[in-house]
Every structure is written in C-alpha cells, then in structure tokens.
Image (cartoon, grey):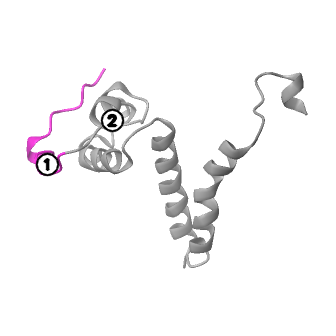
C-alpha cells in the first residue's frame, strides 16, 4: 500500500526482481568456484556487466572497448575515467553495433583525456 502514499513507489517490484535474476541464475555457477579469487573475479565481471546494462550500452562492445584500451591507460586515472560506462567516449563508442574487424588495436584512436 506504500505506492498509494508516495507517488515515487512502484506498484510492483518486477523491475527489481528482473535486475536480481541474473545474479540468482549465476548463484548456481558460483558453487563451482575453486578459490576466493575466482569468486571475486566473477563478482567483478557481474558488476561490470550490470553497470553497462544500467547505462544502456552494448555489453559485448563495452567489454571489447575496455579490453582494447585498458593496457595502455590502466595507470592513468584520466584514462580509467574515460573507460567508465557513463563517460561520453564510451557512450559514443558502445551505443550501437560494433565492427570488430575494423576496431583492432592497430586502428584505434587514442582516448580523449581531460
């Protein structure tokens, strides 16, 4: 009945349940992690994917772009900031279809650092 008292509340919790579904499905896979490091890496990947989804990005393209640029900019805080899902550079590069054949390390443009 809270949705009658506060207009910001949704009538159902379907949206929240859909967001948690991918984690619930992954939970079965988490039983097979052989180490804490493996479980941590899986949690990081789930977090990255869900953040990309929340920012309406093409997930494959976002991961591809991050892995393409990360080796050159991993020690640069400005470079890391440009690789965040909410940055203008990423929104421009990852909001459509990707041509993987032309988007290779040799042909990439440098990150626009601030």
Image quarter of residue 11: top right
Residue at which label 2 appears: 95
- Residue stretch rendered in magenta on the structure: 99-114
Tell me the quarter of the image containing the C terminus.
top left
Task: Say whether residue 86 is left or right of residue 36.
Answer: left
Q: Is residue 8 above or below residue 45?
A: above
Q: Is residue 48 above or below residue 30?
A: above
Nearer to the camera, 76 or 11: 11
Task: Say whether residue 48 is left or right of residue 7.
Answer: left
Tell me the quarter of the image containing the N terminus.
top right
Residue at which label 1 appears: 104
Q: Position of residue 33 (x, y in %)?
A: 55, 76
Nearer to the camera, 114 or 10: 10
Q: Secondary structure at mark 1?
A: loop
> Of helix, strand and loop, which mostly describes the magenta segment?
loop
Q: Residue at x 17, y 46 (%)?
A: 99
């Amino acid at each position: 009945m809270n949705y009658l008292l506060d207009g910001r509340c949704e009538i159902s919790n379907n949206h929240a349940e859909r967001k948690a579904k991918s984690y619930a499905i992954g939970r079965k896979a988490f039983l097979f992690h052989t180490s804490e490091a493996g479980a941590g890496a899986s949690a990081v990947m789930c977090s990255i994917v869900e953040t990309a989804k929340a920012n309406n990005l093409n997930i494959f393209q976002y991961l591809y772009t991050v892995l393409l640029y990360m080796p050159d900019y991993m020690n640069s805080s400005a470079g890391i900031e440009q690789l965040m899902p909410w940055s203008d550079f990423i929104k421009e590069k990852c909001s459509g279809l990707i041509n993987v054949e032309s988007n290779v390390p040799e042909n990439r443009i440098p990150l626009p650092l601030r």
